[in-house]
Image (cartoon, grey):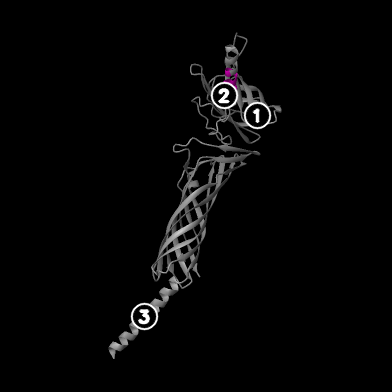
Amino acid sequence: MIKYLITIVLTLALCSSCDGEDFSADPTLMPPATQTGANTFGCLIDGWVYTGQRYGPDHKASYYPACNEDEKATVNIYVRVDTNASISFNIIDPKEKNITIYSALEKIDNDQTIYTDAVFKDGNKQEEKLEDGIVNITRFDLSNRIISGTFEGGRMKEGRFDLTF
Amino acid sequence: MKCKRCFFVAATLLCSASLYAQSGTCRRSILSFQTGPALYTGKLIGTAGCSSSLRNGISWSGSYTYLVGNKPAIRAGFGILYQGNRYTGDMPNSTDKIQTHYFAPQFSLHWLKQQFSLYFATGTGYQIYKDNSTVYDKPRKVSMNKWAANFGAGGEYHLSSHWGISAKINYILAYSGEYSVRYHHKEWTVQPHYPMNGSDDISQLSFSAGINYHF
């Protein structure tokens, strides 16, 4: 009986933390591009601002190290940008570079970090696959578990994130 | 003979001064229209950008005052004030166009002299606050309507029995704890973390000049 109670309480606590809405965050304003693990995310899709500070969970990035030489490490980013909307993508082989100027997608060379599998789920839970793009990782700190950077590609512009994982 | 002439001149002057003073104080209603620079002294809450130019704006106002009491020098007044303020600011990726409209009943004290008058006015009313901003060229509308209070002081120089030129300094004191923002077909309520009592200062100071009409 106690086990059931603990399970129910933990589930409720987990759900409430997931659905937590931070009313102090204005979702219409882009966060600054920081490198402190501030748990901020923002980008434009078709010119409209989407940000992730208002909605949980706290950790919006997950790091998957490479298991063998043939694999590449991946960081998955999943950010809720509205009650039922989210943006997610995978950063392949994340490396800190801090490039200040973006290159056009067609000029991608082997040294650039890209993101793939970008999906935008809108408020009606309709999933849209977005184009791949370039990520400029300005901080990738495995000891403090912080990843920060800027990204751009296709319909997504002016992207920036400063997340813990 | 010379003494009689002096008495006649003095009596005429006194009589005319008395009539002028009566004409300045016997009229009980004052309509006033003014405009001038305004300064946003509070915190720029809910704006898309925080450019320094956003603090400097313009104000315009109209008021009606009815004077009561029979003392010729000091009178109390009751009336109503409308004051509008506008502030604009541009940043690389955002613009702000703040407009406030303040309506309040007024209580005032007037010190009336022959050619000029001084007054102090205060009141409490409602301030409508709108910020028609853009973020990356997309429209974003902020609304923050609040109760507010005003404190003002001014003076008037009487040009004739009906008309005068006036100047005023007015401070509208307001606090806000939240605002609503409409963007991309959705409306959010935002409650920023404020340092004091769950709200912050959104006050404004204005300096204005204009005309008064007495009737």
Is residue A46 positioned above or below A1 on the image?
below
Say which residue label 3 marks.
B13
Find residue B189 and report its image quarter: top right
Say which residue label 2 marks.
A17
Q: Are marks 3 and 2 on the same chain?
A: no
Q: Nearer the viewer, residue A156 or B172?
A: B172
Q: Nearer the viewer, residue B12 or B88?
A: B12
* Label 2: element kind: helix
Q: Amino acid at mark 2?
A: Ser
A133 magenta-colored: no
Highlighted magenta segment, given as a residue range: A9-15
Q: Amino acid at mark 3?
A: Leu
Separation (CA) of disc 3 from disc 1: 83 Å
* Label 3: element kind: helix
Name the disc covering residue B47, or none: none
Chain letter, disc 3 residue: B
Where residue A102 sits: x, y (%)?
Answer: 58, 29
* Quadrant of image for the N terminus of chain B: bottom left
A12 magenta-colored: yes
Say which residue label 1 marks.
A85
Q: Residue furthest bottom?
A: B1
